[in-house]
Image (tube, rainbow, N blue to C red):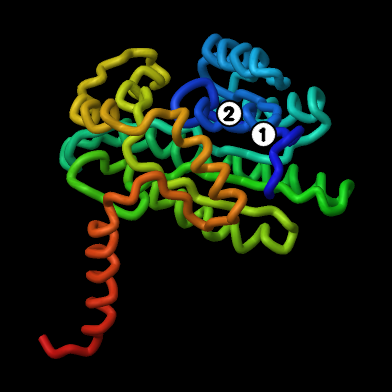
Amino acid sequence: MQDFRDKIAVITGGASGIGLGIARAIASEGGHVVVADIDETAAKAAADDLTSRGVRSLAVRCDVRDDASVDAVFDAAKVEFGGIDLLFNNAGVYLGGEMKDCTLDDWRFVLDVNLDGVFRVGQRAAAFLRAQNEREAGRGGYIVNTASIGGFMSHGGGLAYAVSKYGVVAYSEAMRVDLEPDGIGVSTLCPGPIDTNLPASDRLRNSGETTGGMSEALSPFIRGGMAPDDIGPIVLSGIRRNLPYIFTHDDMRELFKARFDSVLDCIDRIGEPA
């Protein structure tokens, strides 16, 4: 996909952070946006901001943990715009803390959003785009699933987050192969530190209670990161080149190299005597 003018984009987690940065980039090129977010007030504010930039925008409350909520987003997009061209499968949360401190509730909360939610939205979008292409031959489409550099490199903290993002990478790779014959592109977005509300994710648990302690260690890393508005053009450039992975930072090359060198070294040592 090269031209975003009059394209329709659905963005989960679109009311702030990376999602809003992408939405503004789409709007700057004349595309229209469905802002899907669990925070309905923030979604409406984001949609108003985009409308002020001369494009059409629709706010829809969306909890990616709920099938009916996800279906409502695509139903609303069809009613308002007649279809969609892009999905940015971006909603995500984070809890920090060491592995030994991770509880089942922590684990379930993060995976429900970051992995199950990505799957739920992705499957719905894939079916929507395939059906749309049967009616409108050649329309195509594009999906960007947000993973993380944490989808390739785990560390001492953020166990559930890293596991969920590894899963998003695997899901995206399978989706890319599966949808290519239908003319639908898929990229995995792998951002480094971006200045977002990710450290405050605990506020979104069903209990409504915000402890925040599990993510405090992440705050300096995130708050010193790239501005969300700077990531949008990077993502659109990646789509234009149909990149399987879209990275935002190039200063972690050595860490990636060390990881994959270790993998290859272990393969080379198959059969080596103990």
- Viewed as shown, does residue 239 lie left or right of 73? left
Q: Compare residues 145 and 93 and report the one nearer the observer.
A: 145
Q: Is residue 172 above or below residue 58?
A: below
- For residue 148, say whether it is visible: yes
- Residue corresponding to mark 1: 9
At 25% from the left edge and 17% from the top edge, which residue is drawn?
A: 211
Look at label 2 and name its amino acid. Ala
Q: Compare residues 44 and 192 and report the one nearer the observer.
A: 192
Q: Quadrant of residue 17?
A: top left
Q: Compare residues 247 and 117 and report the one nearer the observer.
A: 247
How many other residues sit within 10 Å of disc 1, few (<14), some (14-19) or many (≥20)? many
- Residue corresponding to mark 2: 23
At 70% from the left edge and 30% from the top edge, which residue is drawn?
A: 30
Judged from this view, the residue extending furthest toward the left is: 274
Q: Is residue 197 above or below residue 255?
A: above
- For residue 119, say whether it is visible: no
- Viewed as shown, does residue 169 lie left or right of 176? left
Indicate the position of residue 51 as horizontal and vertical percent values.
67, 15
At 69% from the left edge and 39% from the top edge, which residue is drawn?
A: 4
Look at label 1 and name its amino acid. Ala
Q: Quadrant of residue 264?
A: bottom left
Indicate the position of residue 133 as horizontal and vertical percent values.
82, 50
| Label 1: which secondary element | strand
| Label 2: which secondary element | helix
Quick check: marks 2 and 1 in contact, CB under 8 Å? yes
First-in-chain label (2 vs 1)? 1
Q: CA distance from mark 2 to mark 1?
A: 8 Å
